[in-house]
Amino acid sequence: MRQTLINLEESKIREVANAGMGRSDVLAFWFGESDEVTPEFIRQAAIDSLQKGETFYSHNLGLPELREAVAGYMSGLHGAIGSDRIAITSGGVNALMLAVQALVDAGDRVVAVTPVWPNLTAQPLILGADLHCVSLRPDGGRWTLDLDALLAQVTGKTRLLILNAPNNPTGWTLTRGEQEAILAHCRGTGTWILADEVYERLYYEETPNRCAPSFLDVARPEDRLVVVHSFSKSFLMTGWRLGWLVMPPSLTRHMGKLVEFNTSCASVFTQRAGVVALQRTDEVTPRVVAHLKHCRDTLVPLLKALPGVQVEAARGGMYAFFKLDGYEDSLGVAKRLVAEAGLGLAPGSAFGPEAQGWLRWCFASREPARLAQGVDRLAAWLRAQPAG
């Protein structure tokens, strides 16, 4: 067995969830998914495909009609993007791993902005990369980027820069100016950018295209840029495992080879559901975003009212990331909250050491009243702790 695999840390989010799964008395907000099921018309598209007997392999890069649908969807948000730049993947996680496999050799220098969903830092480590992390900085309850510090870490020896914005867990979002500066710098150093933009539609600021700023808005087709997307968040399709990559056309054929050696292809019936989801996106995503904004605006003020809590409303994503003053062991606190309060949250330490003492609360709940109930449990738990 490879020592790298032995050294990999297990998911601290799963560690907490495993302590509470199966308990009906636990209010679970630990995973990054809505508790609302996929819309019926998307599910029906998959059923129809299965009933037609579409149970065979598809093209490595995905069904042509889905690649075209993705290209049209992305073009509507970010300007002309051809289907020759699109690869369909078996989920966003698979898309990220494919991108890292395509770009990173053992020993390559990789820079990642943290705190971040742990898969994004684990994947280059699995491939033997030399990983360097640049931390966002907390200012009260909001996290910000020291752009100069980041650019100083991205040198001519840096093969890949990994960014997730809107960010899981902090909600931090890159500005257009920051994207332009990063892209220009990486052009100069020859560094690839891997941009995880799966939360771009879950954005609560007013913009003309109703999404967060994207590198695709400022990049040229042949820039060393790979953007990852997923059907999971904006279309309520987490369990379907369907995503896509946007990349330079010169990379697409080679990405098809990697898909072959990883999964061969995404399942056809799942891809049929993806086509319908994109065709009817205006029936799903705007409603999801409006509901999530309501959930955010329900939860954050309640958390802010608790003594010793630092939190700010995130501009994007589906999380409230908050600090409990005086409670630095976030994993221990998260486990105690499950056991003693029936409240399931993700520990900040799962996303990087700089997030120790923070907790992530996924507010994607069908019933905002559950969020208020959860805050009540947190408040009661805090009151029960001994003074000092």
Image (cartoon, rainbow, N blue to C red):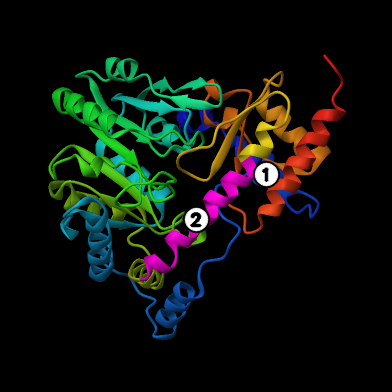
Disc 2 is placed on an element classified as helix
Alpha carbons under labels 2 and 1: distance apart: 28 Å
Indicate whether 180 appears above or below 276: above
Query: Residue visible at 73% across and 41% down?
Result: 375
Query: Residue visible at 41% across and 36% down?
Result: 123
Q: What stretch is highlighted in magenta?
A: 280-299
Q: Nearer the viewer, residue 388 or 296?
A: 296
Query: Residue visible at 56% across and 26% down?
Result: 141
**Which residue is disc 2 drawn over?**
290
Give residue 198's position: percent from left, percent from top.
39, 48
Indicate whether 231 appears above or below 337: below
Magenta span contains residue 171: no
**Which residue is disc 1 drawn over?**
17
Label whose residue precedes the other's in the sequence (2 or 1): 1
Horizontally, is 243 left or right of 108 in the view? right
Give residue 136's position: percent from left, percent from top.
44, 23
Residue type beneath disc 1: Ala
- Are there few (<14), some (14-19), or many (20+) residues within 10 Å of tag 2? some
Prevailing secondary structure of the magenta residues: helix
Q: Quadrant of the C terminus?
A: top right
* Mark 2 or mark 1, whichever is nearer to me: 2
Magenta span contains residue 288: yes
Query: Residue visible at 50% across and 70% down?
Result: 39
Q: Which residue lies furthest to the bottom in this view?
A: 52
Give residue 274's position: percent from left, percent from top.
37, 67
- Residue 346, quarter of the rendered image: top right
Disc 1 is placed on an element classified as helix
Residue type beneath disc 2: Ala
